[in-house]
Image (cartoon, rainbow, N blue to C red):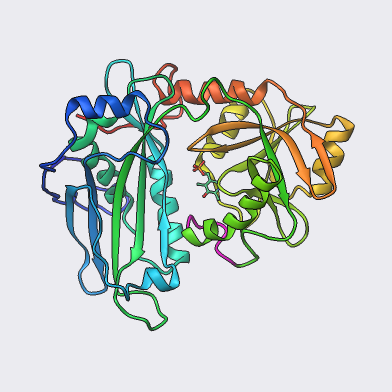
Amino acid sequence: MTLIDSDPDTGLAPLQFAVTKNLNAKTTAQRDEILQSPGFGTNFTDHMVDICWSVNGGWHRPRVQPYGPLSLDPAAAVLHYGQEIFEGIKAYRHADGSVHTFRPDQNGRRLQRSARRLALPELPVSYFIQSLRELIAVDGAWVPTGADQSLYFRPFMFAKEAFLGVRPAHKVAYYVIASPAGAYFKGGVKPVSIWLSEDYSRAGKGGTGAAKTGGNYAASLLPQSEAYENECDQVVFLDQDRNVEELGGMNVVFVYKDGTLVTPESPSILEGITRDSILQLAKDRGHKVEGRSVSLDEWRRGVASGDIVEVFACGTAAVVTPIGELKGRDFFDEQPIGELALSLREELTDIQYGRREDKHGWLVRLDG
Ligand SMILES: *Cc1c(COP(=O)(O)O)cnc(C)c1O
């Protein structure tokens, strides 16, 4: 059990987690072999966090238990109606061995906003942060030490009540699993090619676009296959007025030649914490930053005229990725490549890995 201060907003006391150790945990040698080349999302640590919620009992039965399959009733609502949300956040190992995460209060609040939209219960932010600490307390050795490596946490919540009626579930589960992650780009960051999805959108007005929910990803898979068929890495989605929204799981930022950074803003775009942090770092350097609509037309004309000098995507998994090409059914636009995206990426990762002063107080230590 880890002691943390009570929640400053609500005065909640920390939960008392019951810890069951995994008797079949990987050996040090097995773990070291995985951490040599962790990949992304394929290997998992020895334990997971599990907290239950019910209408009558609220949040209860907080546990750390061996990682393993879940047992679900086949009528569990999530399997039928997709009432599910998730988060993605990393732990970074610093040179002195300590383990830190980045702006977890922001992920905790976003999980609450997603919960509200999906009619799920809101997990207190202090419980969210505590759940990461509890997992690190047992699986801290899984935070890799190599360059650009991290431990990726996947917190998620879903409707587990066995009931086929259509209404918000009365029983919900919250879990955190963790997966060691290697450098996203082997051999250095390289620009990605983007397919413009014209037939499909990922979100609509009043829909769930701003929530981190599985359904948005399910809707993005067919257009993503279309991207692969057209030899592109990722898809970009437009809204009903042909304004740029975002990629399947990353936000988009345009750099103008006067140094202004512009990012599409709309109620159907997911508010990325990487994007917010990158834009803050750009502001600190004196760049102007704007959130507003950007039409496909403005993008294409801006690139053609030289007004737009760089376009990049950002998100926790790949951090910052320059966009090198935009391809549509009947056009192909090479994108200008600049230095700003990579320099902001370096500044952000320097902060996350403790190589540069954390002026905004974004890091939160998870171990010890
Ligand atoms: C998670 C996510 C992002 C990126 O958010 P970060 O907080 O930066 O990781 C962007 N778009 C979508 C659709 C996402 O699900």
Quadrant in the rendering for residue 51: bottom left
Q: Is residue 219 left or right of residue 171?
A: right
Is residue 99 in view? Answer: no
List the single residue furthest toward the front.
Answer: 229
Q: What residue is rendered at 74% in x and 35% in y?
A: 325
Position of residue 338 relative to residue 115, above or below, is: above
User: Residue 145 or 98: which is nearer the viewer?
Assistant: 145
User: Residue 5 or 319: which is nearer the viewer?
Assistant: 319
Our reading of the magenta stretch's main secondary structure is: loop
Q: What residue is rendered at 26% in x and 24% in y?
A: 32
Q: Position of residue 25 (x, y in %)?
A: 16, 38
Q: Please state, as top left, top right, bottom left or bottom right, where the N terminus lies in the image.
A: top left
Position of residue 138 relative to residue 244, above or below, is: above
Q: Is residue 254 left or right of residue 81?
A: right
User: Residue 120 or 163: which is nearer the viewer?
Assistant: 163
List the single residue furthest toward the right.
Answer: 305
User: Residue 360 or 193: which is nearer the viewer?
Assistant: 193
Q: Is residue 312 left or right of residue 359?
A: right
209 in magenta: yes
Q: Is residue 207 left or right of residue 195?
A: left
Quadrant in the rendering for residue 341: top right
Q: Position of residue 54 (x, y in %)?
A: 25, 70
Q: Please state, as top left, top right, bottom left or bottom right, where the C terminus lies in the image.
A: top left
Magenta stretch: give its range.
Answer: 207-213
Q: What residue is rendered at 37% in x and 40% in y?
A: 42
